[in-house]
Amino acid sequence: MDTLILSRIQFGANISFHILFPTITIALGWVLLGFKLAYNRTGAEKWMDAYRFWVKIFALSFGMGVVSGITMSFQFGTNWPGFMEAVGNIAGPLLAYEVLTAFFLEAVFLGIMLFGASRVPGWLHTLATFLVAFGTTMSAFWILVLNSWMHTPAGFEIRDGVAYATDWFAVIFNPSMPYRLAHMLLASGLTVAFLIAGVSALRWLWGERSAQVRATLRTGLVMGAALIPIQIFAGDMHGLNTLEHQPAKVAAMEGNWETRGNVPLLLFALPDEEARENRFEVGIPNGASLILKHHADGVVPGLNDFVAEDGTVEHPPVVPLFFSFRIMVATGFAMLLLSWAGVYFMARKRRGIEGLPKPLLYALVPMALSGWLATLAGWYTTEIGRQPWLVNGVLTTEAAVADVPAPMVLGTLIAYLVVYAALLFAYLGVIFYLSRKAAKGEAPEERIALAPLAQAQVAAE
Amino acid sequence: MTYSDPAIWLPFVFAALMGAAILIYVVLDGFDLGVGVLFPFADKDEQDRMVASIGPFWDANETWLVLAIGILLVAFPTAHGAILTALYLPVAVMLIGLILRGVAFEFRAKAPPARKDMWNLSFWAGSLMTSLSQGYMLGLYIMGLESTPATQAFATLTAVFLTVAYSFIGATWLILKTEGALQKKAVDWAKGGIWGVVLGLGAVSLATPFVSQRIWDKWFSFPEIVMLAPLPLGSALLIAGLWVALRRLPTADDSFAGLPFLGAVALFALAFGGLAYSFYPYVVPEQITIYEAASAPESLMIIFVGTLVVLPMILGYTVLAYTVFRGKATALSYE
Ligand code: HDD
Ligand code: HEM
Ligand code: HEM
């Protein structure tokens, strides 16, 4: 394997690992602020208990997000020097604003949010929680501006192969930015909603009947039920936007080879890029035309439009896009089904959590990670759909890669993979362990058995 | 071209900013990496207190690295690629080190107690990997980013010395933030570490002028030599002062506990000033100057304006955080 493909795998692996944690911290910060405010308002101890449990998972996720994020920022230089050389004038300021307005805010106030409760007045602690949540969201904003610009570049001109900004407003509010930002923030909200619901369901099944677990199970389900319809709508709008700016990507997502009307919505197929056709198609007649063009004979672009005269393929690989898109959408509909069923059973005869049937609770447990699945699938759709471009129409991925020897990249790739696999395992293990302990009703502070003196000094948490 | 030309002063300002970010990083993450390197010399209870002394700060400290590398990336894009591809492997070692120690803060407190030893090990090993690789990169950078057996040997030397220097500043931090037996231990660690600092400063100062004729001329010609004299003289005085102070610490009423840390910061600043003076105006030693590597002035201007507004705020809330967590490190709890 050559340096290009290895670097791509390495970048993909790193960012995939990284995004797992921001997806959690972005929304969980706001949920924690909600718990805190609910406690301030009602004085009900359950909200503080919920805060104490989830702030641990927040801190852990944050730590994982920070260390993997630092890796990301170095990779631009170690593996993709051509990226900054070609579009540094645009990417640079965006990344700089992310560091200045987001990273410092999060990192400094995180200390106060986590360890400062007994040292600062209550309002300052609440403010610190707010600023951390705000910081993570700002950081999502800036990085998504950059990422969207890479998909739908605007507001620049090219001189001697280097991009210069001509209109910063157009750079920031580039055509796909509002859709991508909305879709990603909602994805984060859904990931957290189902994580909370799933972990709470697990604790419930393990026999915990505390006020806290009732409150969080309900919060998770209601939050999920409220967000998922918006997400499906936002996703649809996003797709229409992509159809306008990156038609080849949409053609690959739909698995549509010929430009034509009355295109079916494929539920399943095996796209075959050699033969340039699908096998085993199962579809809803006219579905894709209806969704993308809003009438049954709407003309949808096909992949064969993106093949040059000499036969060179100029569209992204079809199979990964086709399937990752379907995984995301299927997960979205599973979320819809489960969260609405949950809300229905809770509302029926006003039975609350007690009204939830066992099978539903069991189904919620694996759904704890459904947000991760859909988010990764979504990013794979988006990013692979941009290939062979790194910046759509401006810079190819191949032109940006560093000329470091392939064995070196292979070595670091393996090292990262080993570390990431171990950390992911440890991370899930700790969530499991903390849930188990909470379900057994152990107060978290009693855990560390130290000498009496030391115990007074270090709760070490 | 004059100094009012943005193509001249903007790169200079950004080089200064990057220098400041690197110095702040080396001081701040230096002390918390140093605390990590010293881990095996402490017992279990002391280790908890050592982590408590840096727990609320380490994340923000590391953000200065992100800022420094960010400025390199955004202000000097061509240099960024050249430097980071030349340092590919040590950068990877550093990143894995940062990962191992960064996650250990959380895991050692939250994982099942039986795993705590493993996370302590990960904290120590990560801190060590990070310090060593940063020292190695410093050495290679001084050697003009060339990899030959001789430059690698020099880089290995600076790797060891920077690690000792970090544990020195880490020990002075612990003198400030702890009390009792641990504080006494920290004084001993600092006494040991200071010799490493002396050797390290000496080695780098001896090697630097020999790497390039340009630096040699910059050091040993008149009147530069007079203007430079305060650097070595100041460092010598500081080291002597630190040595005297360390012999008298800890005092009965814990006065002057912050002195060694301040001295260490001053020492780091002087050493850094010397390096910055030698390499200016190059960002890739002897190859690319800051003026050649700079981004378009319009882009730099956008960042500059933002920096003017935001940097004071960042400094402000950094001070707030250090004020909130002033005093001796005790319980670190979410309560
Ligand atoms: C949609 C959200 C999102 C996306 C796509 C990315 N990040 Fe990220 N990143 C965050 C959202 C985020 C965050 C929520 O703000 C994090 C997670 C935990 C944290 O501390 O902040 C973060 C942390 C984080 C950090 C550590 C900040 C610190 O020290 O506090 C760095 C250096 C990066 N990221 C860099 C990157 C780069 C170079 C990316 C792309 C190539 C990237 N991130 C994609
Ligand atoms: C956060 C979620 C993201 C995920 C999961 C993700 C995933 C991926 C994947 C899988 C690839 C490989 C595509 C291929 O080579 O076929 C890729 C490419 C790339 N992405 Fe993203 N990406 C994300 C966000 C971003 C962001 C925010 C940026 C930059 C601002 C970015 C920059 C790049 C670059 C530079 C490449 C080119 C390298 C390559 O082709 O592998 N990505 N990404
Ligand atoms: C069920 C209906 C959904 C539809 C119709 C939909 C639609 C889309 C489309 C068209 C894209 C590609 C955009 C592009 O690159 O041009 C996308 C990307 C993405 N999707 Fe979805 N999506 C749905 C559900 C979900 C769910 C449930 C999640 C996560 C919880 C999610 C997370 C993402 C993410 C993270 C991306 C990549 C970032 C972006 O481009 O916005 N999606 N989605």
Image (cartoon, coloured by chain):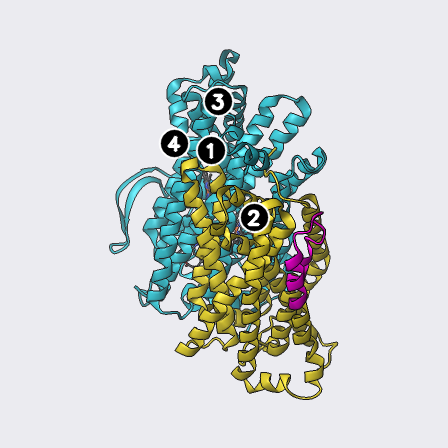
Chain colours: A cyan, B yellow
Q: Is residue A199 above or below residue A74?
A: above
Position of the C terminus of chain A, as image quadrant, is top right
Q: Are marks 2 and 1 on the same chain?
A: yes
Instruction: Tell me the amino acid under the disc marked 3.
Output: Gly
Tag 4, which secondary structure? helix
Query: 10 Å neighbourhood of mark 3: few (<14), some, or many (≥20)?
Result: few
Q: Which residue is mark 4?
A: A366
Label 2 marks a residue whose chain is A
Q: Are marks 2 and 4 on the same chain?
A: yes
Label 4 marks a residue whose chain is A
Toward the viewer: B139 or A191? Answer: B139
Numbered label attached to residue A195: 1
Q: Which residue is mark 2?
A: A140
Q: How far across and down, in percent of the image, does residue B167 sit?
A: 54, 58
Label 3 marks a residue whose chain is A
Q: CA distance from mark 3 to mark 2?
A: 36 Å
Q: Give the magenta-colored segment's residue range.
A: B239-264
Of labels 1 and 3, earlier in sequence is 1
- Which residue is pictured at 52% across the width and 56% down the height? A152
Instruction: Tell me the amino acid under the disc marked 1.
Output: Leu
